[in-house]
Image (spheres, rainbow, N blue to C red):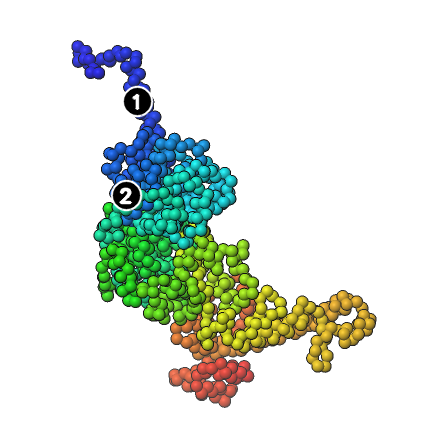
């Protein structure tokens, strides 16, 4: 309403109808309340989110879909969505089963999260309706990430959502599970709850989502997923998403998918990878990989990169050795055996970093959305093209540029290129500039020499790498025989090439998945509660087995444990590619071990006590066996024995006769007497020893004094040099001379102070001056002159001289 003007031009407040004044006031109050609410929600959200500045927060907090006032999707809502979202969301909302395939970084997460939220919202789902949606992820990292996106876009909803990935006590998790509407989980842990937690009500489940579905349907999770699905109602909507989606009928049947819609937005694309991604490969022999990688990092310090390696042991070794070399960029490392908290912390540190280099296993190869990664480096060749596609997908995400480089040994080049071509992956060869190469071999060798922990890591890295190559199925790419292992070992700083023996008939995938599937011979059930391996019935374990099983006492110090931080055995559901899947034998000279893993001709002796049979496979063990047998004769006795004429030991009263023995008093009294008499003897011997030691000390002191006197005369200083230190060696005496004597360590020094003042030392060198010659002449005949033919230079010379002087 326009304001009325008074005659003087000033504004006068105009009277309003009471209803008119109330309206804007009410609106203002509502506005303020809304602002307050928004602020509170924002603050709460930001505080809890790991990376509030991420693009996700900015973009999706404004999506109208996520607001509780949204009554449904309208065409206008689709304009900001990616292809896969635009296609999958409407189908998802219609309740269709979906097989979603789209390139990495194309926004698949929202393609399933939006239908989940929207469908439950429309169904007016409440806490009393139980679990409405379950989202399964193969790794903990990915599950955490999905959960965060869910929280961001679902923050105006009133649904309760939970994250079930382990790392906490089962009971703690179980208490909350009963109240959840949406769960994001890893398969193994979720199954554990479904089997053991009473309060979970899944009968009402509306939607099941599998992110990275091909991986979840893979052998590693097979048994867990099948068992998990058994718990769920068959009447539900199921959505499967992945960048490398499989359409395997058997998988679809296992999940009882009904007439699924195949949403494959990039199926006809020229490449299987994002168009914004530039891909290279370089050929570098295995033995030069470390140097090439180091050179690469040094040349790209102001970037953010992920370096993929084939095992956790490789990751640890490269990280530790590069950390010592300090290339000049923050280094991080991540693998499946780290503690849950450490894994999360590293993930969030890398996400927040501007420049950093993360060494990682395939635990972060899939789905993980690190913001702004410039480079993906594959130091070890991926096991297949799917893994390649997912690894390189950590960069060039959602319209951003990115670069990837793959290191190939000459033996891997042809096979790998063929595979990549078959999958429409455009990749170009590059060469390493000679001047960019960094020679770090000597430095690594030096570090390993000085630091046994690092050497030990190097050995483990070597073993895990070689056996992973040995176990790879694609023999067109992976051929252990073509690799120069001696040179490789040297490049890891190892003094020799570790000898390894492979078990036959193993399958890399099977073994890699063993921790989850419980398939491995080394599965959890093979270990007792202390983590020690249980012995199987009839199994004979050699000393080598035991040697590799036990914690190396010299090397595996507490520092080592800290160094590697590999405390936590991977839970069933985590992508831990790092299991010990082959037993390693250290081979003796003859090289081959027999079927039992024993040296040919070795004997197994039982009945010597102890749990395990005694293996005799060397002369040293033979000797040990003899002494063991002897020890057994007297084991646990410690009694007094007497020897007969043949040197055979007997209990005293077996020789004397018990009655005679008892005449001298009871056994205890005799023992007492014996101990006392021996104690007197020991005391006497002690006194003699002390006297002897004192005499020796005195003698030594006198000799030393004489030497010092002679040296003073010669001007050599007071510290005698017994032998010249060899080149570069520090002279221990010189060091001692410069050290102040600490309190309480004065012993001899004080003794020395008490000695009588020195006699004036005599000169024993010749002085050619006129005066001296005169003096010498006048002394002639008065006393004895000691003639020194040449300067003494041995201890004996000094002693002879001292003796002469003392006589004098
Ligand atoms: N519609 C959108 N508008 C803007 N950014 C988006 C959109 N959808 C997704 N993004 C962003 O793209 C990035 C990748 O999304 P997302 O992680 O869902 O990809 P993905 O397809 O699941 O990848 P991967 O196959 O590697 O798992 C995220 O940072 C996300 O915030």
Which sits earlier in the primary sequence, circle 2 or circle 1?
1
Report the side of 689 relative to 281 (left or right). Answer: right
**Quadrant occupied by the N terminus:** top left
Residue drawn at the location 31% of the way across and 43% of the way down: 261
**Residue 660 appears in which quarter of the rendering?**
bottom right
Residue drawn at the location 40% of the way across and 34% of the way down: 159
Q: Nearer the viewer, residue 190 or 301?
A: 190
**Residue 80 appears in which quarter of the rendering?**
top left
Q: Is residue 719 visible?
A: no
Q: Is residue 803 visible?
A: yes
Pick out the residue farthest to the bottom: 781
> Residue tagged by mark 2?
84
Q: Nearer the viewer, residue 262 or 754?
A: 262
Report the side of 613 relative to 56 (left or right). Answer: right
Q: Are marks 2 and 1 in contact (CB under 8 Å)?
A: no
State whether label 2 is within 8 Å of ligand 1.
yes
Q: Give residue 267's position: percent from left, percent from top.
A: 26, 49
Where is 65 relative to 642, above or below? above
Q: Nearer the viewer, residue 459 or 79?
A: 79
* SS of the residue under disc 2: helix
Where is 494 relative to 777, above or below? above
**Mark number for residue 28?**
1
Residue drawn at the location 55% of the way across and 68% of the way down: 748
Q: Give residue 373's position: percent from left, percent from top.
A: 29, 50
**Mark number for residue 433?**
none
Residue drawn at the location 41% of the way across and 53% of the way down: 220
Neighbor class of circle 1 (other Cα within 10 Å; few <14, some 14-19, many 20+) is few
Q: Nearer the viewer, residue 761 or 363?
A: 363
Q: Give residue 760's position: percent from left, percent from top.
A: 50, 76
* SS of the residue under disc 1: helix
Which-is-in-front pick, marks 2 and 1? 2
Q: Give residue 622's position: percent from left, percent from top.
A: 57, 76
């Amino acid at each position: 309403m326009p304001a009325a003007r008074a005659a003087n031009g000033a504004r006068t407040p105009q009277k309003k109808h009471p209803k008119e004044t109330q309206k804007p006031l009410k609106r203002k109050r509502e506005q303020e309340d809304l602002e307050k609410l928004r602020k509170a929600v924002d603050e709460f959200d930001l505080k809890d989110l790991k990376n509030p500045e991420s693009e996700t927060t900015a973009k999706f907090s404004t999506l109208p879909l996520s607001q509780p006032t949204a009554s449904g999707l309208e065409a206008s809502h689709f304009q900001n969505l990616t292809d896969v979202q635009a296609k999958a969301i409407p189908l998802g909302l219609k309740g269709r089963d979906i097989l979603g395939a789209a390139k990495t970084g194309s926004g698949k997460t929202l393609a399933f999260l939006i239908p989940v939220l929207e469908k439950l919202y429309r169904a007016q789902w409440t806490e009393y309706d139980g679990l409405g949606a379950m989202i399964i992820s193969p790794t903990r990292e990915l599950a955490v990430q999905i959960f965060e996106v869910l929280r961001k876009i679902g923050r105006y909803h009133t649904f309760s959502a939970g994250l079930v990935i382990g790392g906490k006590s089962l009971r703690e998790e179980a208490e909350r599970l009963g109240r959840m509407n949406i769960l994001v989980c890893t398969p193994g842990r979720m199954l554990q709850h479904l089997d053991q937690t009473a309060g979970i009500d899944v009968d009402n489940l509306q939607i099941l989502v599998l992110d990275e579905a091909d991986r979840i349907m893979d052998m590693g999770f097979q048994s867990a997923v099948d068992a998990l699905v058994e718990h769920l109602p068959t009447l539900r909507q199921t959505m499967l998403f992945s960048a490398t989606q499989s359409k395997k009928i058997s998988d679809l049947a296992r999940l009882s998918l009904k007439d699924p819609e195949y949403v494959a937005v990039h199926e006809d694309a020229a490449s299987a990878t994002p168009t914004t991604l530039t891909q290279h490969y370089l050929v570098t022999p295995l033995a030069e990989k470390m140097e090439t990688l180091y050179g690469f990092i040094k040349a790209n310090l102001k970037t953010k990169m992920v370096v993929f390696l084939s095992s956790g042991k490789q990751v640890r070794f490269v990280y530790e050795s590069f950390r010592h070399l300090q290339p000049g960029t923050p280094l991080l490392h991540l693998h499946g055996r780290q503690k849950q908290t450490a894994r999360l912390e590293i993930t969030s540190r890398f996400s927040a970093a501007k420049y950093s280099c993360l060494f990682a296993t395939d635990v972060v190869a899939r789905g993980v959305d690190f913001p702004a990664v410039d480079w993906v480096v594959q130091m070890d060749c991926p096991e297949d093209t799917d893994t390649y596609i997912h690894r390189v997908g950590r960069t060039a995400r959602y319209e951003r540029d990115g670069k990837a480089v793959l290191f190939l040994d000459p033996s891997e080049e042809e096979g790998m290129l063929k595979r990549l071509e078959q999958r429409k992956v455009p990749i170009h060869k590059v060469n390493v500039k000679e001047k960019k190469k960094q020679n770090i071999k000597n430095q690594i060798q030096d570090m390993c020499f000085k630091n046994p922990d690092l050497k030990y890591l190097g050995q483990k890295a070597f073993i895990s790498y070689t056996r992973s190559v040995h176990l790879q199925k694609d023999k067109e790419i992976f051929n252990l025989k073509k690799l120069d292992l001696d040179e490789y070992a040297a490049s890891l700083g190892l003094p020799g090439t570790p000898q390894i023996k492979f078990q036959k008939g193993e399958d890399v995938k099977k073994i890699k998945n063993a921790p989850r599937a419980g398939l491995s011979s080394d599965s959890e059930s093979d270990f007792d509660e202390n983590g020690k391996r249980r012995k199987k019935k009839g199994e004979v374990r050699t000393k080598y087995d035991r040697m590799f099983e036990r914690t190396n006492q010299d090397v595996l110090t507490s520092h080592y444990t800290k160094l590697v931080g590999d405390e936590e055995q991977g839970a069933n559901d985590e992508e831990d590619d790092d299991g010990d899947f082959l037993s390693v034998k250290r081979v003796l000279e003859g090289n081959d071990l027999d079927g039992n893993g024993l040296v040919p001709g070795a004997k197994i002796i039982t009945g010597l006590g102890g749990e395990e049979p005694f293996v005799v496979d060397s002369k040293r063990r033979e000797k040990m066996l003899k002494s063991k047998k002897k020890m057994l004769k007297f084991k646990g006795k410690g009694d007094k024995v007497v020897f007969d004429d043949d040197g055979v030991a007997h209990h005293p009263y077996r020789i004397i006769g018990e009655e005679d023995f008892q005449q001298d008093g009871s056994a205890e009294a005799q023992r007492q007497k014996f101990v006392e008499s021996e104690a007197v003897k020991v005391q006497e011997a002690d006194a003699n020893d002390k006297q002897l030691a004192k005499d020796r000390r005195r003698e030594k002191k006198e000799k030393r004094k004489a030497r010092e006197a002679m040296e003073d005369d010669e001007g050599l200083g007071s510290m005698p040099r017994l032998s010249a230190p060899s080149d570069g060696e520090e002279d221990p005496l010189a060091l001692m001379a410069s050290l102040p004597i600490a309190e309480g360590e004065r012993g001899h020094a004080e003794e020395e102070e008490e000695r009588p003042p020195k006699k004036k030392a005599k000169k024993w060198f010749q002085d050619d001056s006129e005066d001296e010659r005169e003096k010498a002449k006048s002394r002639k005949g008065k006393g004895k002159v000691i003639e020194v033919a040449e300067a003494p230079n041995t201890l004996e010379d000094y002693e002879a001289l001292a003796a002469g002087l003392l006589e004098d």
